[in-house]
């Protein structure tokens, strides 16, 4: 059984920073793309950033220049450094990974970590 576990969420003032982490555990042969998504109350889940196994990154326009996604392949972990946070970015942040466990590739999600940005 593969699990993704996020950490690092919390309460921060507008303009502040947080660093999220997400580690994958279980029977893992390969991890392809990893990413972060967020869902604010009453809104749909949206892409924040993704990173390939080779380190290529993609960001939502709203976070470019402020957020940085990175990964440590040896630790099966993806990170999201968030700077200059805005109150509108209050949401539950989820990590996501495409993982080959045993035979098949599957997409896994973490349980989410709350990020609250106060004004």
Image (tube, rainbow, N blue to C red):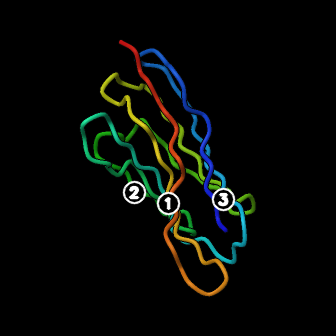
**Residue drawn at x 52%, y 70% as measured from the top left:** 98
Give the x, y percent position of residue 22: 61, 49
Query: Which quadrant, please, contains the C terminus?
Result: top left
Task: Please state if 71 lies on the left or on the right of 63 as rendered.
Answer: right
Q: Judge whether 13 appears above or below 108 on screen.
A: above
Residue 90, percent across and down? 37, 28
Report the residue marked by disc 1.
51
Task: Residue 58: give its label.
Answer: 2
Residue furthest to the bottom in view is 103
Q: Is label 1 in contact with label 2 (beta carbons under 8 Å)?
A: yes
> How packed is label 2: few (under 14 Cα within 10 Å), some, or many (20 or more)?
some
Q: Residues under labels 3 and 2: Cα distance? A: 20 Å
Q: Position of residue 50 (x, y in %)?
A: 45, 57
Q: Distance between the residues labelled 1 and 2?
A: 6 Å
| Of the image marks 3 and 2, the number of the one nearer the N terminus | 3
Q: Is mark 1 on a helix, strand or loop?
A: strand
SS class, disc 3: strand
Mark toward the start of the polypeptide (1 vs 2): 1
Residue on which disc 3 sits: 24
At label 3, counting other C-alpha atoms closer than 10 Å, the crowd grade (few under 14, some 14-19, many 20 or more) is: many
40 with respect to 66 (left or right): left
Q: Which of marks 1 and 3 is nearer the N terminus?
A: 3
Describe residue 107's horizontal placement relative to residue 28 as left or right.
Answer: left
Q: Who is closer to the viewer here, 35 or 39?
A: 39
At x 63% / y 59%, what residue is drawn?
3
Residue 86 vertical placement versus 69 (above, below): above
């Amino acid at each position: 059984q593969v699990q993704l576990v996020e950490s690092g969420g919390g309460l921060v003032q507008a303009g502040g920073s947080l660093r999220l982490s997400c580690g994958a555990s279980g029977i893992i042969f390969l991890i392809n793309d990893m990413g972060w998504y967020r869902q604010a109350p009453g809104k749909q889940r949206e892409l924040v950033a993704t990173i390939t196994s080779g380190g290529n990154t993609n960001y939502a326009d709203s976070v470019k220049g402020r957020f940085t996604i990175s990964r440590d392949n040896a630790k099966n972990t993806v990170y999201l450094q968030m700077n200059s946070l805005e109150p509108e970015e209050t949401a539950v942040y989820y990590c996501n990974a495409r993982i080959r466990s045993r035979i098949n590739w599957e997409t896994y999600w973490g349980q989410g970590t709350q990020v609250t940005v106060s004004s």
